[in-house]
């Protein structure tokens, strides 16, 4: 028995009326996982025993009628710290690290009654766009097992797309939720910077990182985001802006809404078929009364360069804590303290992580700081100003999430620059700290593609409103890969 075709509101109704129990739902989820996992490789670790104990407790105390996540299983990206459950960010250097605390988002999910089913695979320390930089194994795309699921939240995307779980959390530094959502035909949201606490998120680029949800539909995504958002005294970068119910504008008319399409997001480097699907998607919104206009984000072409300087600089600093002493892996045979650091880090980090540390250390070093890190910060400001200008008279910006659909495993993993370019449409959003969604918007060569809707700071509600209006007028979210319908 599978429940993977039911929304969490439908599951909630079944749980409340006791037609199913949280224990049955959790057990069915593990059956779905077991029957698909050898094909998609989405998980690093399953927490079946703890999940079943938690489900039994929820059944005993009763489903929380006011909480849609009560008794609902969810998968967690492995860079989000989970108490007593090994957390590695898919890196050899963290192998065996069992955190003594929960990330704030995990505390929030647990108190909402959500059931954690396991930790998902990812590019090591969230550095990558295909999932192939995991130190453990590559995750496969649910639509075509020979293709990448996108990254870095590869396992979180594939676990939802393949029907293993209904919900998951990922993290997005330069596109790591939205791009795999686009490649996998599901909904992915990067919230406004500061909306969701980063306490317990293993830091990569601290001025960019945000945790956000993956879900099959817009409403479910909004429901999860509502549960995990809010000010946190343990993360000084969280905003004290009130957290609305992010579903509140779903269903409202979009008539008169002003939506810009940035010409730079439809330019060279974007697959022509992706472009034509996005224009078709825009006309669906136009039919509902939205006013679509061309706008310009003139500095967005520098986004990738700026990001790989600033994010790598932040990473080179953040990753200093992995020294072979305090966490996880320690190399054998070291003869001095320096030797422990050098050997443990050389053996413990993968190629891409080392590349970022070197890039970042270089751009922060005396003599190069002004030319790289400082300059990149200045260009970042120009990118932010571009967005401010467009948002002074537009509600949203629409475009493709990724320039192409998912590609073959192995196609780009020896070509980092091309891989980096794959984030050219998502990165400017992180540079400006804005919220954005990727919502299923069609197929190119039988692979899903996503439309990105970028909103004003703290205006996730409008993003969800328009995304839901689009979803309601289309059928893309109902199309599923064959593996999704697999009987356990
Ligand atoms: N982590 C991300 O959000 C994406 C990006 N592909 C990176 O490697 O940095």
Image: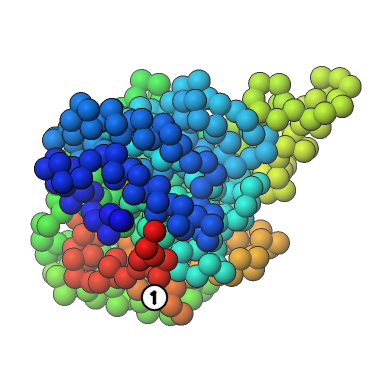
**In the image, 369: left or right of 383?**
right
Which color scheme did the rendering employ for the protein?
rainbow
Q: How many numbered tags mark residues here?
A: 1
> Residue 425: horizontal and vertical position, in percent?
46, 60
Q: Residue at x 33, y 43 (%)?
A: 26
Secondary structure at badge 1 equals strand
Q: Residue at x 80, y 25 (%)?
A: 340
> Residue 97: horizontal and vertical position, in percent?
60, 28
Foreground of the two, 470 or 224:
224
Foreground of the two, 276 or 374:
276
Q: Residue at x 53, y 67 (%)?
A: 145
Q: Is residue 243 above or below residue 437?
A: above
**In the image, 37: left or right of 239?**
right
- Residue 381 makes an appearance in the image: no
Q: Is residue 17 above or below residue 5?
A: above
Q: Indicate the quadrant containing the N terminus: top left, top right, bottom left or bottom right.
A: bottom left
Q: Which residue is mark 1?
A: 443
> Residue 112: horizontal and vertical position, in percent?
26, 32
- Residue 284 makes an appearance in the image: yes
Residue 113 position by quadrant: top left
**In the image, 385: left or right of 146?**
left
Q: Indicate the quadrant containing the C terminus: top left, top right, bottom left or bottom right.
A: bottom left
Foreground of the two, 151 or 78:
78
Residue neighbourhood size for the residue with mark 1, other residues' Cα within 10 Å, grouped as few (<14), some (14–19), many (≥20): some
Residue 361 position by quadrant: top right
């Amino acid at each position: 028995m599978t429940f993977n075709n039911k929304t969490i509101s439908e599951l909630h109704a079944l749980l409340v009326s006791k037609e199913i129990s949280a224990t049955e739902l959790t057990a069915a989820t593990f059956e779905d996982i077991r029957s698909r996992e050898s094909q998609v490789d989405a998980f690093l670790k399953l927490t079946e025993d703890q999940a079943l104990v938690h489900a039994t407790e929820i059944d005993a105390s009763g489903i929380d009628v006011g909480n849609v996540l009560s008794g609902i299983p969810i998968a967690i990206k492995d860079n989000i710290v989970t108490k007593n459950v090994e957390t590695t960010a898919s890196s050899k250097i963290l192998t065996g690290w069992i955190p003594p605390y929960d990330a704030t988002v995990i505390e929030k999910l647990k108190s909402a009654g959500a059931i954690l089913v396991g930790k998902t695979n990812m590019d090591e320390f969230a550095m990558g766009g295909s999932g192939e930089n995991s130190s453990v194994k590559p995750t496969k795309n649910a639509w075509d097992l020979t293709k990448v699921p996108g990254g870095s939240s590869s396992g979180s995307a594939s676990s939802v797309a393949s029907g293993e779980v209904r919900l998951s959390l990922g993290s997005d530094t330069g596109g790591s939720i939205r791009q795999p959502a686009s490649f996998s035909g599901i909904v992915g949201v990067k919230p406004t910077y500061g909306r969701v606490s980063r306490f317990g998120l293993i830091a990569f680029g601290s001025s960019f990182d945000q945790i956000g949800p993956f879900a099959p539909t817009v409403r479910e995504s909004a429901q999860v985001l509502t549960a995990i958002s809010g000010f946190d005294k343990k993360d000084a970068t969280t905003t004290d802006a009130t957290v609305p119910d992010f579903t509140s504008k779903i269903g409202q008319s979009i008539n008169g809404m002003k939506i810009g399409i940035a010409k730079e997001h439809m330019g060279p480097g974007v697959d022509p078929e992706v472009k034509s699907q996005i224009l078709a998607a825009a006309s669906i919104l136009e039919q509902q009364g939205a006013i679509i206009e061309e706008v310009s984000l003139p500095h967005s072409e520098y986004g990738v360069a700026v990001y790989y300087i600033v994010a790598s600089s932040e990473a080179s600093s953040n990753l200093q804590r992995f020294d072979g002493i305090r966490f996880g892996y320690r190399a054998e045979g070291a003869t001095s303290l320096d030797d422990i650091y050098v050997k443990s880090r050389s053996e413990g980090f993968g190629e891409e992580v080392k590349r970022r540390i070197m890039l970042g250390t270089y751009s922060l070093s005396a003599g190069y700081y002004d030319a790289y890190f400082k300059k990149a910060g200045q260009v970042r400001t120009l990118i932010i100003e571009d967005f401010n200008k467009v948002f002074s008279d537009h509600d949203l910006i629409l475009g493709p999430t990724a320039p192409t659909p998912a590609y073959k495993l192995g196609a780009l993993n020896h070509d980092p620059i091309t891989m980096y370019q794959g984030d050219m449409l998502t990165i400017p959003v992180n540079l400006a700290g804005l919220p954005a969604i990727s919502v299923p918007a069609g197929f190119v060569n039988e692979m899903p593609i996503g439309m990105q809707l970028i909103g004003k700071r703290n205006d996730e509600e409008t993003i969800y409103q328009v995304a839901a209006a689009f979803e309601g007028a289309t059928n893309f979210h109902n199309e599923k890969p064959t593996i999704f319908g697999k009987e356990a």
